[in-house]
Image: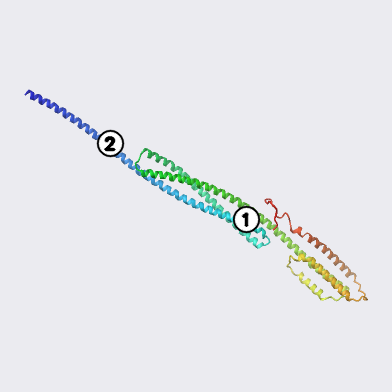
């Protein structure tokens, strides 16, 4: 009995030890289970945060794509405007060349006053149009510069955000290859846009240089136009002086014809010669021509020849009539009044002849000036057109 009891006690102690071990194992298992649950919760939280971060990154990626699309659209607009500006600049160059050719041609046809006035109006209109177009180009350049500055500010603002995104990508490694490719594509696109922006700035600087050249050329064209107007005014003054001189010559011619006819009549009456019909018609012709107001430039050159013809006709009439008079008949004596009048007419004719010769010799001096086309800005030899 004692042995059974000892065995039973020993068995009981063994069982207690075994139960104690089982309880320890159960406690360990519960602790490990709690640790696993906590780790699972932490993992779920980290997965949720990663999903949220992934969504945020996708949204930012979409925003970057939209911004790049907007920049590309703005770049296309700027490129189209630059093409339009280049076209307008080429048109301005063509207009300037046409204006220079028209100014050179206008100097060759200065005698045609209506055409000169029409060309002057046309050139003034063209110059005003050029100034307006240059003003519009300057405004466009200002707008382009402002837009480029805005674009540069936006690009500088977006660049640190992109670097932050790259840092977050390096800190939080994502296994999606699509996102990495999209980011690389964004970086390449951004670099391309920046290079195109630099090219645009270079083109705008070239256009500014061309605009400055156009402004200087328009100023030179304005100087040429002012010089042309001054020369045209001088020509008009000289033409007016020439017209006045021709009027004076015609008046002297009429007075000379009157005096010649009067002298001829006095000689005929003094010699008791019948007045021929040619003298009467000539006298009536001088009276009619004295009433005319229109003058002709060719009368200046014909004045001396007409004087010679008048004197020749008088000599012919006197010689013919004196041949008809018999030699036996003595000529009647002229009165003192007639002699004085004939002497006065002869002296006046001599004075008129001397003054007409002096005037004819000074015509070139009066209407031709060697310093006419000289100015402060002209250079080279003077060409007479």
- Give left or right: position of 207 versus 351: left
Give the CA separation, mark 2 to mark 1. 89 Å
Say which quadrant the N terminus sits in.
Answer: top left
Residue 240: x and y, percent?
72, 61
Q: Nearer the viewer, residue 7 or 335?
A: 7
Determine which residue is flagged by label 1. 100
Q: Secondary structure at mark 1?
A: helix
Residue with the mark numbered 2 = 39
Left or right relative to 167: residue 3: left
Give the residue displayed 49% in from the left and 51% down from the top: 79
Question: Residue 338's image quarter?
Answer: bottom right
Is residue 288 positioned above or below 15 on the image?
below
Q: Residues within 10 Å of mark 2 (few under 14, many from 20)?
A: few
Q: Quadrant of the C terminus?
A: bottom right
Q: Quadrant of residue 37?
A: top left
Q: x, y (%) of residue 354? A: 82, 62
Marks counted in the figure total 2
**Where is residue 97 drawn, in percent x and y?**
60, 55
**From what the image shows, is residue 371 above or below residue 31?**
below
Between disc 2 and disc 1, whose residue precedes? 2
Residue at x 79% of width, y 60% of height: 361
- The answer to whether 3 appears left or right of 239 in the picture is left
């Amino acid at each position: 009995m004692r042995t059974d009891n000892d065995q039973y006690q020993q068995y009981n102690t063994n069982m207690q030890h075994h139960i104690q071990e089982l309880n320890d194992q159960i406690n360990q298992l519960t602790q490990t289970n709690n640790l696993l649950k906590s780790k699972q919760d932490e993992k779920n939280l980290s997965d949720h945060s990663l999903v949220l971060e992934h969504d945020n990154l996708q949204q930012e990626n979409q925003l970057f794509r939209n911004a790049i699309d907007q920049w590309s659209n703005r770049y296309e607009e700027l490129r189209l405007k630059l093409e339009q500006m280049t076209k307008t600049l080429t048109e301005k160059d063509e207009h300037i060349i046409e204006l220079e050719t028209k100014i050179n041609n206008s100097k060759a046809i200065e005698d045609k006053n209506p055409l000169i006035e029409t060309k002057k109006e046309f050139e003034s209109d063209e110059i005003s149009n050029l100034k307006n177009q240059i003003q519009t180009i300057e405004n466009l350049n200002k707008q382009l510069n402002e837009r480029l500055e805005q674009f540069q500010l936006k690009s500088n603002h977006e660049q640190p955000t992109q670097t932050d995104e790259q840092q977050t990508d390096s800190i939080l490694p994502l296994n999606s290859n699509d996102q990495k490719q999209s980011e690389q594509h964004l970086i390449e696109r951004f670099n391309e846009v920046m290079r195109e922006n630099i090219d645009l700035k270079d083109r705008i600087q070239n256009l500014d240089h061309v605009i400055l050249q156009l402004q200087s050329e328009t100023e030179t064209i304005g100087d040429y136009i002012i010089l042309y107007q001054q020369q045209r005014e001088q020509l008009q003054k000289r033409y007016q002086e020439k017209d006045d001189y021709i009027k004076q010559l015609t008046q002297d011619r009429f007075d000379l014809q009157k005096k010649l006819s009067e002298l001829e009549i006095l000689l005929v009456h003094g010699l008791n010669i019948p007045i021929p019909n040619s003298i009467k018609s000539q006298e009536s012709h001088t009276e009619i021509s004295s009433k005319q107001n229109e003058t002709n430039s060719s009368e200046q050159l014909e004045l001396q020849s007409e004087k010679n013809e008048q004197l020749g006709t008088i000599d012919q009439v006197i010689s013919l009539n004196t041949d008809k008079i018999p030699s036996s008949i003595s000529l009647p004596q002229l009165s003192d009044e007639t002699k004085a009048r004939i002497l006065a007419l002869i002296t006046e004719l001599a004075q008129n002849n001397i003054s007409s010769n002096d005037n004819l010799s000074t015509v070139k001096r009066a209407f031709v000036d060697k310093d006419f086309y000289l100015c402060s800005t002209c250079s080279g030899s003077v060409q007479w057109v």
